[in-house]
Image (cartoon, rainbow, N blue to C red):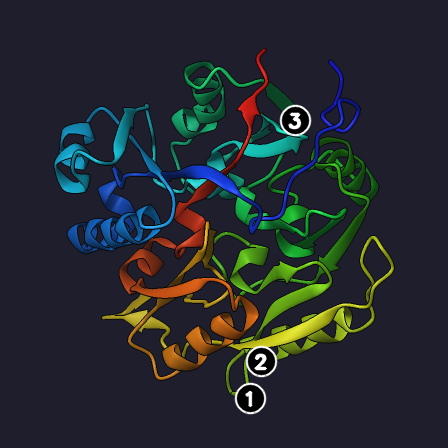
Amino acid sequence: MRTPTEDGFHMPAEWEPHAGCLISWPCKEATWCGYFEDAKKAYLEVIRAINRFEPVTVLADPSVALEARKAVGDNITVIEVPLDDSWIRDNGPIYVVRDNHIAMLHFGFNGWGGRFLPFEKDARVPEILSELFRTRRYPVPMVLEGGGICVDGQGTLITTESCTLNRNRNPGLSRDEVEDILKSYLGVRKILWLRQGIYRSMIDGHVDGVAAFVEPGVILHASCEDPQDPNSEVMRTNKELLQTMTDARGRSIEIIDMPMPRLREIEGNRIAPCYTNFYIANGGIVAPIFGDRNDSLALEVLKNAFPEHEVVGVRCEYIGIGGGEVHCITQQIPLGSPVFP
């Protein structure tokens, strides 16, 4: 089978026009450490916020489909899909575009390096959606979560060594082989490697916890000024690396500092909150906030980075208990007509 790059496809930037957004409804109570109902309320607020800007399609395991339909109301589509958990960014399809057409990539998914079981249903989601949406699917010969990468739409991808090169994902692949696959399937020409993501991340440090492109050549990067916080050294190292890098078109990387929340746990349950984990909708930014003193500063940074977008903050600390924020629970569908098969 030909690769997407050979067929003229590439992964677009997240700020490019969308047909809609996918979100999986929470279905695994054990994920939420006693805060299952709080997590569902937070998901619902994210769904409502994004639906102001573009259509949201909710995927729901059959066991919770009725609950999901009652919660979201009649103006949001709910599709029954067998699920293990509710992180569509990581186990769902990654879309690529060619002119006005779209196709899906189906990366392998192994429960974040085998840490979270079971994952077999989640691993099949792109295959199921390919049939439901009648969209061409390209199986990719490596394990990758969508939260582990970010692209600028012009040939540059940013990721972390701690996750994408972790031996619990692709033990048989070298760094060069990983790069070759990413280039062949995502249509990128240059990969920027950060050392790691958030300190002691339960998923090995996805890049969406620490950095995001906001336009070609410009990266929003987490900044930690507290010398007692282990993230301080992590972010300093990553920033120093970025300052030496250029993108696929030879531009030096412009860095916008984004503060990190001070919040680190809820009643003894550790979370890893981050302001870089936002969703770019059509004309809107849906951003995580935490009742933290840095919330207002983070929202202001996003307003300056996206002056043409309305920035909406949604409380996400209870999503954080499960290990992610807004970006982790969403997956954009680019605007375009599906290619099938």
Q: Residue at x 32, y 59 (%)?
A: 321
On residue 227, the disc is 1
Q: Is residue 130 left or right of residue 41?
A: right
Residue type pointed to by label 2: Ser
**Crowd rating for badge 2 (residues with CA inside 10 Å; few <14, some 14–19, many 20+):** some
Residue 271 makes an appearance in the image: no
Where, quadrant-wise, is the N terminus in this rendering?
top right
User: Cβ–Cβ below 8 Å for labels 2 and 1?
Assistant: yes
Residue 235 makes an appearance in the image: yes
Query: What is the x, y in percent for residue 166?
Result: 65, 47
Look at the picture and state if 44 lies above or below 258: above
**Crowd rating for badge 1 (residues with CA inside 10 Å; few <14, some 14–19, many 20+):** few
Instruction: Pick the residue in front: 126 or 203.
Output: 126
Residue type pointed to by label 3: Val
Of the image marks 2 and 1, the number of the one nearer the N terminus: 1
Query: Which quadrant of the structure image shows residue 284?
Result: bottom left
Q: Is residue 264 left or right of residue 74?
A: right
Element marked by disc 1: loop
Which residue was labeled with disc 2?
232
Residue type pointed to by label 1: Pro
**Crowd rating for badge 3 (residues with CA inside 10 Å; few <14, some 14–19, many 20+):** some
Instruction: Pick the residue in front: 280 or 179.
Output: 280
CA gap, disc 1 and disc 3: 41 Å
Q: Residue at x 49, y 60 (%)?
A: 201
